[in-house]
């Protein structure tokens, strides 16, 4: 029997060979690679006695640089199949079993640790299979999965795209699972804003949010990021 650890696995899925913007995980954000920015944001804002940050990249040689950046930030790194992302998650769970798993993508450098913690608590309180917050800026929320859901998905005959986009099967079959959607309130309820990086324009847009002399820019709150983004568009 697999012994489940008490910590929540926060898995950053990342590959250099991005289809939309090659190497975007290594693009500089406030002077450091975007992946490093995200790792530091998660590590410094999530209590290590409850959360374990893990980088899941591919076995392909061009992801050696992703692996090295992960190691340089002293986090666990798992390497696996490029397109079968679900398999990478299962590999991670086999080595580091956890009751709750958070999916984070490396092109979302402003993933919000506070929202992440809130959704993890919602997942545990409601014994949910899957939890997501729907009305945040795009690229801020995380997907929360249960261990049981991910392992059951791995046993199903899924479409190729459902193994690459691991929430797709759940979203297409909501009635089969205990799915919880939450809505943010107040200032951060801004689904009209884009904070993900899919294109060079996206990267430029996010990079301009930071000044040259900021200390620990990765600790910016979502409220502050929204304020700066609104001011930049005036």
Image: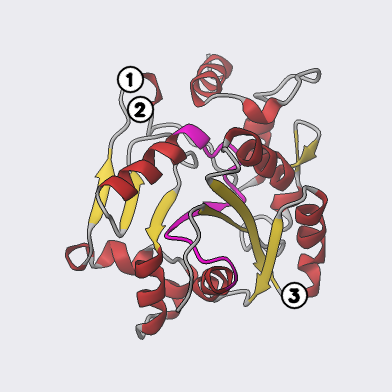
Q: Residue 97, percent across and down?
A: 51, 66
State the residue at coordinates (74%, 56%): 23
Q: Measured from the top left, where is residue 185 in percent x and y?
A: 30, 25
Q: Position of residue 86 (x, y in %)?
A: 49, 72
- Quadrant of residue 37 within the rendered picture: top right
Numbered range of the magenta stretch: 95-114
The label shown at residue 79 is: none
Location of the N terminus (image quadrant): bottom left
Q: Position of residue 64 (x, y in %)?
A: 81, 66
Q: CB under 8 Å between callouts 1 and 2?
A: yes
Q: Are marks 3 and 2 in contact (CB under 8 Å)?
A: no
- Give the camera-side residue of 116 and 232: 116
**Counting residues from the N terminus, which is met first, the one under dot 3 or under dot 1?**
3
Whether 99 is among the magenta residues is: yes
Which residue position holds label 3? 60
- Mark 1 and mark 2: span between their CA atoms? 6 Å
Which residue is the site of mark 1? 186
CA–CA distance in space, label 3 to label 1: 43 Å
In the rendering, which numbered label is found on residue 189?
2
């Amino acid at each position: 029997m697999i012994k489940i650890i008490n910590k929540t696995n926060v898995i950053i899925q990342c590959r250099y060979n991005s289809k939309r913007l090659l190497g975007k995980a290594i693009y500089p954000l406030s002077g450091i690679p975007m992946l490093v920015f995200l790792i530091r944001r998660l590590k410094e804002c999530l209590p290590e006695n409850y959360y374990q940050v893990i980088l899941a990249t591919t076995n392909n040689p061009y992801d050696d640089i992703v692996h090295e950046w992960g190691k340089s930030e002293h986090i666990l790194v798992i390497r696996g199949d490029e397109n079968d992302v679900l398999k990478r998650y299962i590999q991670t769970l086999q080595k580091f079993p956890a009751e709750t798993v958070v999916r984070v993508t490396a092109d979302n450098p402003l993933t919000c640790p506070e929202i992440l913690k809130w959704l993890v608590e919602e997942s545990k309180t409601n014994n949910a299979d899957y939890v997501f917050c729907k009305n945040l800026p795009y690229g801020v929320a995380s997907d929360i999965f249960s261990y049981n859901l991910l392992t059951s998905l791995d046993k199903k005959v899924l479409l190729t795209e459902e193994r690459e986009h691991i929430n797709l099967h759940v979203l297409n079959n909501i009635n089969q699972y205990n799915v919880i959607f939450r809505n943010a309130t107040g200032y951060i309820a801004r689904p009209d804003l884009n904070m993900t990086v899919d294109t060079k324009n996206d990267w430029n847009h996010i990079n301009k949010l930071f000044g040259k002399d900021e200390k620990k820019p990765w600790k910016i709150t979502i409220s502050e990021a929204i304020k700066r983004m609104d001011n930049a568009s005036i």
